[in-house]
Amino acid sequence: MRKSSKLIGIITIIFATIGCKKEPEFEKIDFDWKIDVIENIGRNLNPNQKYEYWALLRSSNGGHEHVDILHEQGMTENRNLMNLSYNQEGFIVRGHHATYAYYIMAVENGQVSKIKNTEDLKLFLGKIDTMEEALLLTQIKEFGIDYCDERGGSYRKTNDGFEFYLMKSNSTGSLVILESLENTQYLVTVNNSGIVNSKSCGVYCQGKKECIDCG
């Protein structure tokens, strides 16, 4: 009887081991934080189709009105087909003292198309198959990335897309507010179709010392 119980136990462990696939660990989002987050993201976008040329652009009125090319791919001679005049239309528009609008322009058969809203962006990207594409969609939803704490700045690949731990802060940038600063962690999922869902996991740091002085 004892041998039989032992054999059943061994079989149970074997089946449990086979049936339980270990989830991948979350990895820290490793960007060059000296440059624009969206510029980092632009380096690994994979459009749904091959374009003769496309560029990720940032239009800004900071200091003076201008447009920067953050990333480009394809035949750069097509750049002169694009209107690079300042505008405030984009799939991301943010800023307080200055306004920054992010958008994409693509050239195919001599025709220029401007991707300036979320639906057009999803069509441009097609299947969300890189971490950066998924992260770009979370930026549209105004989630922040904590560059020094993985609880607010990490990701992992899933069977149907990507999961992130991102954050939102109650800070407005005021020195007075910093002492009562709170960063809230969010589990954010982005599937291969570009659908974004999130849930709050609660506050994970409080005050300037915990949330900012992380160096």
Image (cartoon, rainbow, N blue to C red):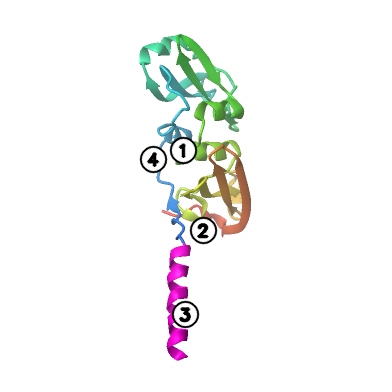
Residue at x 41% of width, y 34% of height: 44
C-alpha gap between disc 2 and disc 4: 22 Å
Prevailing secondary structure class for the magenta stretch in the rendered image:
helix
Residue at x 47% of width, y 54% of height: 150
- Eye-nearest disc, 1 or 2: 1
Q: Earlier in the sequence, mark 2 or mark 4?
A: 4
Residue 180: give x, y in percent of width and height.
Answer: 62, 55
C-alpha gap between disc 3 and disc 2: 50 Å
Q: Which residues are magenta?
A: 1-20
Q: Could you say which disc has been placed on residue 129 in the image?
A: 1
Residue 20: give x, y in percent of width and height.
Answer: 47, 63
Are discs 3 and 1 less than 8 Å apart at CB?
Answer: no
Residue for badge 2: 210
Label 1 sits on what residue type? Asp
Label 4 sits on what residue type? Asp
Residue for badge 4: 32
C-alpha gap between disc 3 and disc 1: 43 Å
Residue 21: give x, y in percent of width and height.
Answer: 45, 60
Residue for badge 3: 8
Label 2 sits on what residue type? Glu
Are discs 1 and 2 less than 8 Å apart at CB?
Answer: no
Q: Nearer the viewer, residue 21 or 109?
A: 21
Q: Is residue 17 magenta?
A: yes
| In the rendered image, the vertical position of residue 83 relative to residue 70, given as above or below | above
